[in-house]
Image (tube, rainbow, N blue to C red):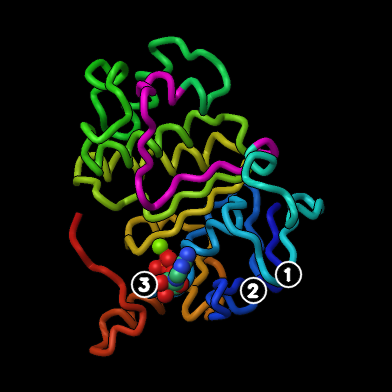
Amino acid sequence: MLELQNIHWSLPGGEEIVRGVDLRIEPGRLTVITGPNGGGKTSLAKLIAGLENPTEGRILMDGEDITGLDITERARRGIAYAFQQPVRFKGLTVRNLLDLAAGQQLEEHQACALLGKVGLCAKEYLDRPVDASLSGGESKRIEIATVLARTNARVLVFDEPEAGIDLWSFNSLIEAFQELKRERSGALLVISHQERILEIADRIAVVAEGRVRVSGPGVQILPTLLHEEKSALCPLGMDRKEV
Ligand SMILES: Nc1ncnc2c1ncn2[C@@H]1O[C@H](COP(=O)(O)OP(=O)(O)O)[C@@H](O)[C@H]1O
Ligand SMILES: [Mg+2]
């Protein structure tokens, strides 16, 4: 279990972005964080992954205080993070990247299966370099595949996995999350505005203005979000783009 206790995070200039977040992310469950743009969701993901350090509060993993650990040490403890913005690596092929994520040389069929899960035709991609020749959507999907490759991960964090993904692969993405829920004992944390991802959430937390505005079982929270979303004010600023 990953536990955020009273997490605050300020910019170097002093502006407070995350303003006292308490959150429990439980193993075997899919937790979805949603809320308006600029609310602090990506900042929370970075704080969990160790890309940023809180100015106040503690992060515990199975009771161990990991607040002071850097990104490498957290990755070693099983925190896997897929960025909102795709990352490109010079000189690495897609196959290299998957091997690195898995921590072993994958058999071709294993690498192909991972790419298949994110809707990429594997044979065309395995030997492609991970560079600017990949579109944003392609590198995003490859990044999701690298998180899926980390079979020993205990906390998997996906920041807006739907971004740049077309309908066909969106369906396979939903399937991949459902499979992760069934087959992995780790905790799944997905930041998303997508109704179909919210629908499969065990727990939903709405983050706005750096705080958890409401959280609870998905079946309780989702109807209130959909209701709010239909109102003229659209307070969550949720994106109803069809995918
Ligand atoms: N490194 C940074 N420098 C300046 N502003 C930042 C930085 N990181 C986040 N912010 C600001 O903090 C707020 C929350 O950002 P973010 O966590 O990305 O929100 P969300 O993912 O919910 O859209 C935004 O106003 C954003 O501009
Ligand atoms: Mg974000």
Q: Position of residue 93 (x, y in %)?
A: 35, 21
Residues tagged 1 and 2 counted as in contact (Cβ below 8 A): yes
226 falls in the magenta region: no
Give the mark count.
3
Query: Which tag, 3 or 1, sits closer to the chain's start?
Result: 3
92 falls in the magenta region: yes
Residue 88 picture quarter: top left
Q: CA distance from mark 3 to mark 1?
A: 23 Å
Give the residue pinned by disc 2: 8
**Quarter in which the C terminus is drawn:** bottom left
Residue sitting at x 65%, y 60%? 53
Name the foreground residue: 150 vs 240.
150
Q: Which residues are magenta?
A: 76-98
> Cβ of disc 2 within 8 Å of ligand 1?
no
Name the foreground residue: 100 vs 186.
100
Q: Secondary structure at mark 1?
A: strand
Label 3 packing within 10 angstroms: few (<14), some (14-19), many (20+): some
Q: Secondary structure at mark 2?
A: strand
Residue 72 picture quarter: top right
Query: Which tag, 2 or 3, sits closer to the chain's start?
Result: 2
Image quarter for ligand 2 equals: bottom left
Query: Which tag, 1 or 2, sits closer to the chain's start?
Result: 2
Residue 57 badge? 1
Residue 37 badge? 3
> Cβ of disc 3 within 8 Å of ligand 1?
yes
Q: CA distance from mark 1 to mark 2?
A: 6 Å
Q: Amino acid at mark 3?
A: Asn
Q: Amino acid at mark 1?
A: Gly
Q: Is residue 194 left or right of residue 59?
A: left
